[in-house]
Image (tube, rainbow, N blue to C red):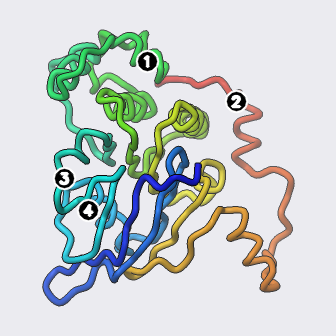
Amino acid sequence: MNEIIISVKDLKKNYGEFEAVKGISFDVRRGEIFGLLGPNGAGKSTTLEIIETLRQKTSGEVIVNGFNLDDSPNEIKKIIGVQLQTSGYYPSLNLTELIHLFAGLYNEIIDPLTLLDSVNLRDKAKAKYKELSGGQKQRFSIATTLINKPKIIFLDEPTTGLDPQARRNLWELIKNIRDAGTTVIITTHYMDEAEVLCDRVAIIDSGKIIALNSPDKLIDELVDTGFERPKEVKKANLEDVFINLTGHVLRED
């Protein structure tokens, strides 16, 4: 898992005199779940949108699976899948029809039921997107990123607004996608989520990367400074209580 699939060097993005991204550099390894974390306005979404070919950079170098962003943006588009925070789908089409539509756009032949099976939505094959629960919508949105059999998928805050069962179900889905060989880039404001899912994380603030390592190593480095939580850490948290009392089985609205 040490092969580099994304290489970003001295990436900068300016809006007039405002520097949104200030010369950041990082690599993503093939087959890992890589988290880009930071407060709102830190520059993480801008960074990802540049890599995804959705936004122009000011300067710097971006290489994705051997393709230079400056020379081969269309080649990059062919090997990535992008799930955004908000997605718009034709309201009159059911999930099967939507999959056929996306497959046609990618010039791919795909079995909708097999794809829906992978995200536990086979029973919703004839349902319209608007009829799905929040967790189902997120799972279907992720399914659409897999239609072109991408080498890399980008997930932008995929569990925002989901209940604990739906969140943990989505965590398992993301792990399964990684285990099947796809590199996953994720943004999230949930630090517990990043700690569970990510092999490595980059923390970005004010347009600069201020830390990059595995979650465990970053936590160990903080503890080594003498940091202690003001409250005793218990062996479980309230979410564990909720899951234990209500069950691990995913429920749909």
Q: Secondary structure at mark 1?
A: loop
**CA gap, disc 3 to disc 1?**
32 Å
Residue 112: x %, y % from top left: 33, 13
Q: Secondary structure at mark 3?
A: helix
Q: Which residue is mark 2?
A: 246
**CA gap, disc 3 to disc 4?**
10 Å
Residue 196: x %, y % from top left: 65, 50
Of the image marks 3 and 1, the number of the one nearer the N terminus: 3
Classify 18 as above or below 150: below
Q: What residue do we see at 25% from left, 59% from top?
A: 68
Tell whether label 1 touches label 3 (CB within 8 Å). Answer: no
**CA gap, disc 1 to disc 4?**
32 Å
- Of tags 2 and 4, which is closer to the observer? 4
The residue closer to the viewer here, 209 or 167, is 209
Of the image marks 2 and 4, the number of the one nearer the N terminus: 4
Q: As shown in the figure, which amino acid type bears the numbered disc 2? A: Thr
Q: As shown in the figure, which amino acid type bears the numbered disc 3? A: Pro
Q: Which residue is mark 4?
A: 50
Tell whether label 4 touches label 1 (CB within 8 Å). Answer: no
Q: What residue do we see at 20% from left, 56% from top?
A: 54
Q: Which residue is mark 3?
A: 73
Residue 230: x %, y % from top left: 80, 77
Q: As shown in the figure, which amino acid type bears the numbered disc 1? A: Leu
Q: What residue do we see at 50% from left, 48% from top?
A: 30
Of the image marks 2 and 1, the number of the one nearer the N terminus: 1
Q: Secondary structure at mark 4?
A: helix
